[in-house]
Image (cartoon, rainbow, N blue to C red):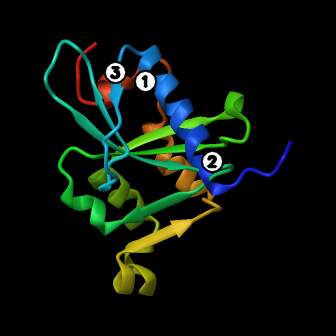
Amino acid sequence: MAKIDSQQTELIGAAILTASLVADGIEIAKPARDDGVDLLAYDLNTTALVPIQLKASTRTAFTLDTKYAATPDLRLVYVWNVSDPGAAQIYCLTYVEAFSVAAEMGWTSTPTWSARGRYATTRPSAKTHELLAPYRVAAGEWPARLGRSG
């Protein structure tokens, strides 16, 4: 397989996420501008929109930036293993949930967090995987993860 560049990674991750949402009956819209929101998720039975910030990776990566705390109801969606869509994993967290993971890992006490308000790892530890496990999204779970009933 050819090496995947960052733009391809983002496109493949968006396609995987879109397919997963649509399969669960969730509609999506793409904002005309990138203002920290990559997709808007909704269903036709409600007027609520849920903003999504996509973080796609060819392997595994967890990043968090304080700038996302300002967007109400934002979901940070991490799509891992986009280079092999059949093995892709999707995690969906609110900012508070993602911050909780980062704090538990000690990342919010690092100089990088203090100076820049962000932290990233491309090699999440076993403990990080364990903390993220409850946020992994499987087929049929999107309505609940987006705060909607069935």
Dot 1 crowding, Cα within 10 Å, few <14, some 14–19, many 20+: many
Marks 3 and 1, how far apart at CA: 7 Å
Extreme-right residue of the structure: 1
Residue 106 seen anywhere in this rendered image of the structure: no
Q: Where residue 71 sits: x, y (%)?
A: 21, 53
- Examine the rendered structure and indicate whether residue 97 appears above or below residue 42: below
Which numbered circle lies on residue 27? 3
Among all residues in the image, which is located at the extreme front? 32
- Could you tell me which quadrant the C terminus lies in? top left
Q: Earlier in the sequence, mark 2 or mark 3?
A: 2
Mark 3 burial class by Cα count in 10 Å: few <14, some 14-19, many 20+:
some
Three-letter residue code for mark 1: Leu
Residue pictured at 47% horizontal, 50% vertical: 131
First-in-chain label (3 vs 1): 1
63 left or right of 67 in image: right
| Disc 1 target residue | 21
Residue bearing mark 2:
9
